[in-house]
Amino acid sequence: MMSKRRPCLVLSKRALNSIHKRALICPITSAPPQGILQIPIPTNQKNIQGTIMLDQLKSLDYRVRNAKKIDELIDLELYDHISSLIGVIIHR
């Protein structure tokens, strides 16, 4: 049984994804943020709303999942904020 599609934010670079056929992603939920590692998506994003769950980093085979791009993160300040939080997660 196939579950319904779930949105996510792809963190890994396109070139890396094409080599490994996998992408590093963070799921997006409709629930409000719960802590500093859950980031609300700005209202200026056209096609997606919700909360990016940085505390749920995952690797995903996008070919098997038949993934489709529906939007692109346009807020560069948010992108920088997400990058710095990921640095906190993966560095000592």
Image (cartoon, rainbow, N blue to C red):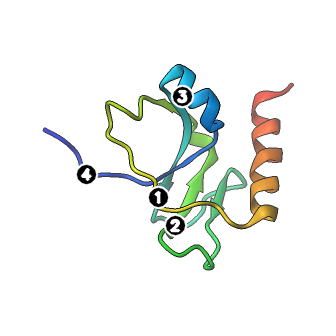
Tell me the CA gap for discs 1 and 4: 13 Å
Tell me the CA gap for discs 3 and 1: 26 Å
- Regarding mark 1 in the picture, which secondary structure is present there? strand
Query: Could you tell me residue 67's position as x and y percent?
Result: 38, 44
Q: Earlier in the sequence, mark 2 or mark 1?
A: 1
Q: Earlier in the sequence, mark 3 or mark 1?
A: 3
Characterize the local packing of mark 1: few (<14), some (14-19) or many (20 or more) Cα atoms within 10 angstroms: some
Tell me the CA gap for discs 2 and 3: 27 Å
Residue at 25 percent of width and 51 percent of height: 4
The residue pinned by badge 2 equals 50
> Height in image: 49 above or below 81?
below
- Regarding mark 2 in the picture, which secondary structure is present there? loop
In the image: residue 84, left or right of residue 32: right
In the image: residue 35, left or right of residue 18: right
- Regarding mark 4 in the picture, which secondary structure is present there? loop
Dots 4, 2 in contact, CB < 8 A: no
The amino acid on which the numbered mark 2 sits, given as a three-letter code, is Gly
Characterize the local packing of mark 3: few (<14), some (14-19) or many (20 or more) Cα atoms within 10 angstroms: few
Residue nearest the observer in this picture, 29 or 17: 17
> Height in image: 24 above or below 74?
above
